[in-house]
Image (spheres, helix red, strand yellow):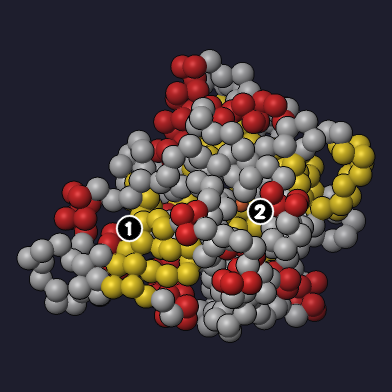
Amino acid sequence: MISFVPLSLPPSADPTKFRDFGIEVRGVHPGELTDEQFKQIEQALYKHDLVLFRGIELSPEQQHRLVKAFDPDSENFGHGDRAIENTQRSILHSYLRGLPAVPQVQVIGHGTVKDHEGIPELTMKHGRHPEFHKTRISEEDESKGFTRFFRWHMDAALYDLKPSRVTALYGIKVPVAPLQTIRYDDGTGDELTVNVGSTAFVSGKTMFEILPPELKSLAVRAKAKYAPHPFQWMKNAKAISTGFGLETEGLEVPLDQLPAWEDAKIKIYPFLWKNPVTGALHLQVHPCAIMEIHVDPLPEGRDSAGALYPSGGKITDLKQIRELLYCMQRPGIDPSLVYAHPWEAKDLVLFHNRGLMHSVTGVFKPDQVRLFHQCNLAASDEPVGPSQEDIERWA
Ligand SMILES: [Fe+2]
């Protein structure tokens, strides 16, 4: 019998902000769902944005089939099968590798494993903030268990391919280790205690809902234009201390020095993505990959007092773009709004990739082995933005 149980929240989480977010499913195997059961899981995913199964044995084929069921016309891994392996220049290269038999399923983790799913030997690297952030926690403090978020994002190539609807993360080997404390290091003193290697999630819906009216009005009218080959464009740039965006130091690769790109493959997406089941608006902007903001004017006849960009406009200054976006997104990663999943082996997390943002956390020791399978598929359609009604309501 399929049953839905609320997620256990950490003491740091504000339960009033997690009423809809996250659900645990019991009583069914996610690799053996009937059509009827799949429909229930699909509804739950869009309603709760994160669905957890525990104690599951899941083959790569089952994982791929499950993810594909959310988008039957999707075909390839969200960044293109093998596309990352073939481009040493992408910043994602060191973290992702496809399985030989099911290339849509990526192996991620830390340490060395032998003879895994047809790969004789594989050394993985868990993303660590010192390799990506401009500043770092001292080695001494790191050894005492302090760390940071790595890079907040949704799983999307943001050039040519369409952002996947769902990501499935499956924990195979999960090291047991003490708690670590994430520092925000942005002057707020904010900290968050998590299990080592937790994946941190925040709701894009909550991120929108807690904004003041003038930023809601901007969000509902704004679009993000992403850089061509954004992960190569940003490869030299360094992140700010919360991992939610980049420092602006002119380190992006000039557009004419990137591999060949076409205008038609550049992505311009609304800031707000509409949930296909609940109709809610989720603030979904990749803070590292954005290159321009395009703002529509206020609807006709609207009082422009206090409105930001009432006549619309195009913002092309990277520093200005990042500062404005950070004002909109930073409230959404307040420690009380973060769900950091404490992984156990055989956990399967399905998340609504168009409804939340996530980040790797933590630091593993060289001899700790973590092994995960991840699957997401470039979607068959683009995210849908706010409706006319949404614009009338929030602009
Ligand atoms: Fe991810």
Q: Amino acid at mark 2?
A: Ser
- Identify the mark at residue 198; answer none if there is no mark: 2
- At x 73% / y 32%, what residue is drawn? 102
Q: Earlier in the sequence, mark 2 or mark 1?
A: 2
Q: Are marks 2 and 1 in contact (CB under 8 Å)?
A: no
Residue 356 falls left or right of residue 180:
left
As helix, strand or loop, the secondary structure at mark 1 comes to helix
Instruction: Say which element carries label 2.
Output: loop
The percent position of residue 356, horizontal first and vertical second, equals 48, 51
Q: Is residue 183 among what the camera can see? A: no
353 up-or-down from 185: above or below: above
- Percent position of residue 308, x then y: 25, 75
Q: Mark 1 sits on what residue? A: 209
| Quadrant of res 283 | bottom left
Q: Nearer the viewer, residue 356 or 383?
A: 383
Distance from the alpha carbon under mark 2 to that under mark 1: 25 Å
Q: Is residue 145 above or below residue 19?
A: below
Name the residue at 56% across, 30% down: 68
Residue at the image position 77 percent from the left and 38 percent from the top: 99
